[in-house]
Image (cartoon, rainbow, N blue to C red):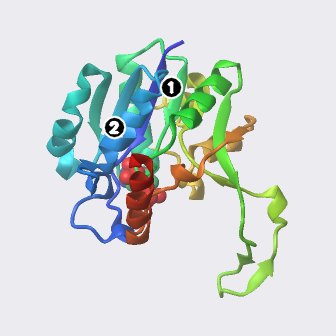
């Protein structure tokens, strides 16, 4: 049962404040993206990885992933994250038309432990249509209105923080992205554009959870880079 992973890495990553797109920011001598791809392939259950790169950085990304050989290919990303996922998925299915499982993994979650990747793949292989890694919510969460006034305090026991890779039966994700009906179309526009499982939920397909990991956090701010440095230093001892 072949597994494709698509890695949307075409964002600018402005919150990180770096001169290069976030996926190309170097940590321990390698771009974040290379750490992410390395993690996916190290899990031992991913057959092919498609990276969606920023249009202006395709040749840099191709050079960065060259070491992985034909297991990794690169496409030009789209305007929104969902467009990048759609383009990478379409390309991955031409490389491995028989794939049954698709993972969508943010390049910025570059240090996701292989155990998380394996448990998502195993859960989809066991027959679940959509699987996401999650963490419990430690903070109290408020819902606010457009003026910033608090309107609700949801019970955090029923909330989860969502990580990646998110795993899908290939037909479920193809359908969510409308790939069969309109292969050249745009990604469905939605506030859920940050989350592929959200699109799947909208089509009424059940989404299941597995345990995420604190190391799978999304590297977003300069503070996160300091956390990564500390994490890697801890691993090295
Ligand atoms: O902006 P945010 O951190 O939510 O982006 C999540 C992931 O989606 C990042 O890895 C980013 O590079 C990717 N992305 C993309 N194409 C875009 C926008 C974001 O591949 N147009």
The residue most toward the front is: 237
Query: Residue 51 has which mark?
Result: 2
Is any part of residue 80 visible from this angle?
A: no
Identify the residue shown where x is 69% and y is 44%. 202
The reply to whether discs 1 and 2 touch (Cβ–Cβ < 8 Å) is no
Residue 213, horizontal then vertical, whole percent: 60, 47
Q: Quadrant of residue 100?
A: top right
Answer above or below: position of 130 versus 192. Answer: above
Task: Judge by depth and name the residue closer to the eye, 133 or 149.
Answer: 133
Is any part of residue 157 visible from this angle?
A: yes
Answer above or below: position of 209 versus 194. Answer: above
Residue 56, horizontal then vertical, whole percent: 18, 52
If you read the primary sequence from the N terminus, does the residue marked by circle 1 or circle 2 appear first? 2
Residue 237, horizontal then vertical, whole percent: 41, 49
Identify the residue shown where x is 41% and y is 21%. 93
Dot 2 alpha-carbon crowd within 10 angstroms: few under 14, some 14 to 19, many 20 or more:
many
How far is mark 1 from mark 2, CA to CA? Answer: 21 Å
> Which residue is label 1 attached to?
180
Residue 12, horizontal then vertical, whole percent: 32, 60
Identify the residue shown where x is 42% and y is 28%. 42
SS assignment at label 1: loop
Identify the residue shown where x is 19% and y is 37%. 62
């Amino acid at each position: 049962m072949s597994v494709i992973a698509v890695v949307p890495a075409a964002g600018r990553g402005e919150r990180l404040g770096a001169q290069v797109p976030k996926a190309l920011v170097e940590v321990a001598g390698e771009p974040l993206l290379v750490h992410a791809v390395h993690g996916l392939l190290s899990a031992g259950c991913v057959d092919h990885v498609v990276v969606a790169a920023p249009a202006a950085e395709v040749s840099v990304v191709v050079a960065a992933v060259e070491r992985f050989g034909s297991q990794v290919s690169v496409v030009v990303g789209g305007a929104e994250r969902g467009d990048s996922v759609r383009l990478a998925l379409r390309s991955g299915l031409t490389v491995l038309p028989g794939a049954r499982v698709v993972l969508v993994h943010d390049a910025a979650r570059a240090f996701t432990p292989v155990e998380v990747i394996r448990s998502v793949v195993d859960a989809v292989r066991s027959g679940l249509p959509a699987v996401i890694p999650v963490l419990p919510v430690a903070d109290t969460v408020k819902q606010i209105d457009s003026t910033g006034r608090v309107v609700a305090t949801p019970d955090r026991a029923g909330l989860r923080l969502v990580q990646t890779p998110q795993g899908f039966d290939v037909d479920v994700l193809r359908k969510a992205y409308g790939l069969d009906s309109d292969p050249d179309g745009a990604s469905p526009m939605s506030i859920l554009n940050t989350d592929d499982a959200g699109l799947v939920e909208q089509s009424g397909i059940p989404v299941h959870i597995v345990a995420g990991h604190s190391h799978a956090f999304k590297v977003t701010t300069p503070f996160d880079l300091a956390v990564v440095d500390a994490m890697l230093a801890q691993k090295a001892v």
